[in-house]
Image (cartoon, grey):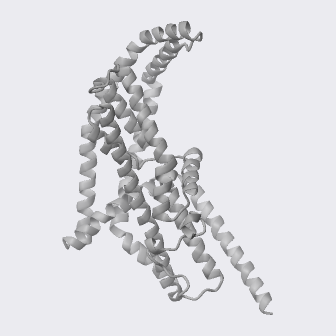
Amino acid sequence: MGQQLNANKLLRDTFMYLALLLLLVWILFSYRALISPLIIASLLAYLLNPAVNFLKTRLSVPHSLAVYLVFIVFILGGILLGIYLVPLVIRQAQFVSAELSAFPGRAGMVDDYLKAQLGFDLALQQRLMDLQTSSSQLLHPERVFQLIRAASTNVVWVGVILVATFYLLKDWEHLRDGIFSLAPDAEREQLQKLHSEIKAIWQAYLRGQILLMTSVGVLTWLGAMAIGLRGAVLLGLTAGFLDIIPSVGPVVAAGVAALIAGTQGSTYLPLSNLWFVVLVVGMFTLIQTVENIWLQPQIMHRQMKLHPAIVFIAVVSSLTLVGALLALIIIPFLGTLIVILNYARTKRRGAGREEFEISPSSERPAPIWANEKEHV
């Protein structure tokens, strides 16, 4: 009789979890356009929340006023950064355009040299002329209209992200308490502990990300000084800050460094500006290779107790299959999923309230997916 009841309970739970999974998939598919903006808004709110807590705890500022102050400073900082960067980007784009217009002639000399010395023709001059033709087509009225429409759509989404960020900062505690209040009294304490564990996972990820950004910034600064690239400190700060955006951030940082190298050259290396640009791009490629293969897996392994191979495969597969946004959150998402599965497993076994205990992140025992050397 008892076995029959357990079998019925297992069947009922299986159907319930399957129904919840299908409902979640349907919601995510129906509102897939909102997923990316909400993820970005959540990350922004999470990054700005420490400043709000600082004003509340250290300066005794009321919560609403602290949120307004932090959000206003964030908006003004973004506006000032845009005012500074937009003219710089325009000037650098004009320089690149002028350089590209002179490249076909130089490329013809390169083609002749390669054909004479190595016996093959890259047709580099023709490829650059085709690139110029394609670039000129960007000014076609239809392309201009498409760019304006895309820019208008992006402005709307930026507004949605900012509004969602503000309300998440302002009302997250009420939303969290409201969600907890929906749970039965017997489960509320366990859900609060689960929330604490998930919060510890994301805090560990944030610490690891800050350490990773600092490492990339220092490596870029030292590398730029070693080869005589001007603005080494600023480039290090830029590379470290943009490193939080997978794939896109490092490319932007390398592009800025390449523009500086192309206009200023090296302070002491006897290289032409063109070859110095090649050297700078190679340096950034080397730093990114070291980061992706060694730095990120090792740092996230120490912070989150995930095996380096899992970290590397998760980030690379996310970048390849989905994009930079998922790659940004895939590591803490995996940690969160593991915690939730552990919680579900203990509840399914009929564990007592004391069995699912939360310990600080630094004191958690190494799980089975961690490096085997830690178990010795």
Q: Nearer the viewer, residue 369 or 209?
A: 369
So how many labels did they put on this image? 0
Left or right: residue 33 compared with residue 83: right
* Residue found at the very far bottom of the displayed protein: 1
Q: Residue 19, position in %: x, y?
A: 67, 70
Q: Residue at x 42, y 59 (%)?
A: 208
**Residue 340 falls in which quadrant of the image?**
bottom right
Above/below status of 294 relative to 222: below
Q: Residue 281, position in %: x, y?
A: 42, 31
Above/below status of 227 relative to 188: above
Q: Quadrant of the N terminus?
A: bottom right
**Residue 362 falls in which quadrant of the image?**
bottom left
Q: Residue 118, position in %: x, y?
A: 57, 11
Q: Residue at x 32, y 41 (%)?
A: 222
Q: Nearer the viewer, residue 106 or 365?
A: 365
Q: Residue at x 56, y 50 (%)?
A: 318
Q: Residue at x 48, y 84 (%)?
A: 189
Q: Nearer the viewer, residue 240 or 245?
A: 240
Q: Is residue 325 visible?
A: no
Q: Is residue 211 visible?
A: yes
Q: Quadrant of the C terminus?
A: bottom right
Left or right: residue 92 compared with residue 114: left
Above/below status of 192 relative to 207: below
* Residue found at the very far front of the displayed protein: 376
Above/below status of 17 relative to 296: below
Q: Residue 247, position in %: x, y?
A: 47, 43
